[in-house]
Amino acid sequence: MQVRYRRILLKLSGEALMGDNSFGISTTVIDFVASEIKAIVALGVETGLVIGAGNIFRGVAGASKGMDRSTADNMGMLATVMNSLALQDALERCGVDTRVQSAIPMQSVCEPYIRRRATRHLEKGRTVIFAAGTGNPYFTTDSAGVLRALEIDADLIIKATKVDGVYDKDPVKYSDAVKYDRLTYDMVLKQGLRVMDAAGIALAKEEKKPILVMNMTVPGNVRKAVLGENVGTLISSE
């Protein structure tokens, strides 16, 4: 079986971990995510992950209610560490060797982020979860995902969502919404499509790093993606 993408960066939203809950982490969902990752690791795919924190605390939301933006973003970055440790636990319970590296040093619970060490872990078949975003306020975990993908030289960024790709408008609200199979970075930026923040798209465009937007809730989709099958929406320079 031919794997098309040997090293990937999988970007998960914090909200995706809630399942049907209104807050926190669903063990059912996180176990499902772990099983999907295990399937691609079994194919020899070197896997890095970045997880958001919307299920616990979102910095922008805190700032909108009067909090200092830097303080709120720091709280959000700490929340990503909680999500990362939860996913590490789920992965290791199903037999996937995993390391968490945090951009904010907290050595009693995880490793500090060191690019060369992360790359070495990946080469040894360990899954690496990159926590705490970029370590800086004002940057989203989308931007952090693209940054880490560039640093580890991933072949593909997978943006995992609850929909099966990018549409011209919200498919939940509009029955006539049209799904794109392929997009260019410029199309995403010019049309204001809500794929990820503009800084992340611009960074991926500069380095010509492809982004695949796909539905993570469908069993086997991540495996299909790394095999190069037609799932989701591919964003590239062409």
Image (cartoon, rainbow, N blue to C red):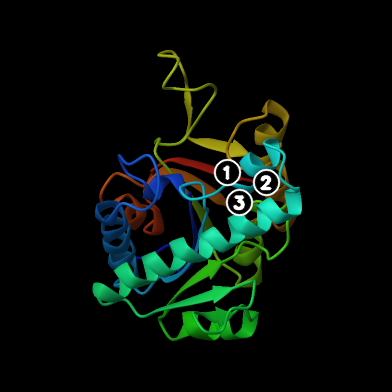
Looking at the rendering, which quadrant does residue 114 occupy? Answer: bottom right
Among the two numbered marks 1 and 3 on one chain, the one whose residue lies closer to the N terminus: 3
Q: Dot 3 lies on which element?
A: helix
Residue with the most extreme front position: 66
- Given residues 2 and 134, the one toward you in this image is 134
Q: Residue at x 32, y 57 (%)?
A: 30
Residues under numbered marks 2 and 1 in contact, where contact means CB atoms less than 8 Å apart: yes
Q: Amino acid at mark 3?
A: Asp
Q: Which residue is mark 1?
A: 235
Residue 188 found in image quarter: top right
Residue 221 location, x and y as percent?
32, 49
CA gap, disc 1 to disc 3? 15 Å
Say few, some or many: other residues with alpha carbon within 10 Å of mark 1 (under 14 / 14 to 19 / 20 or more).
many
User: To which residue does mark 3 refer?
Assistant: 142
Where residue 176 appears, as percent x and y from the top left, is 44, 13
Task: Tell me the distance, in whole angstroms, between the alpha carbons under discs 2 and 3.
Answer: 9 Å
* Residue occupying the point 58% across, 85% down: 117
Query: Relative to 212, is 125 on the left or the right?
Result: left
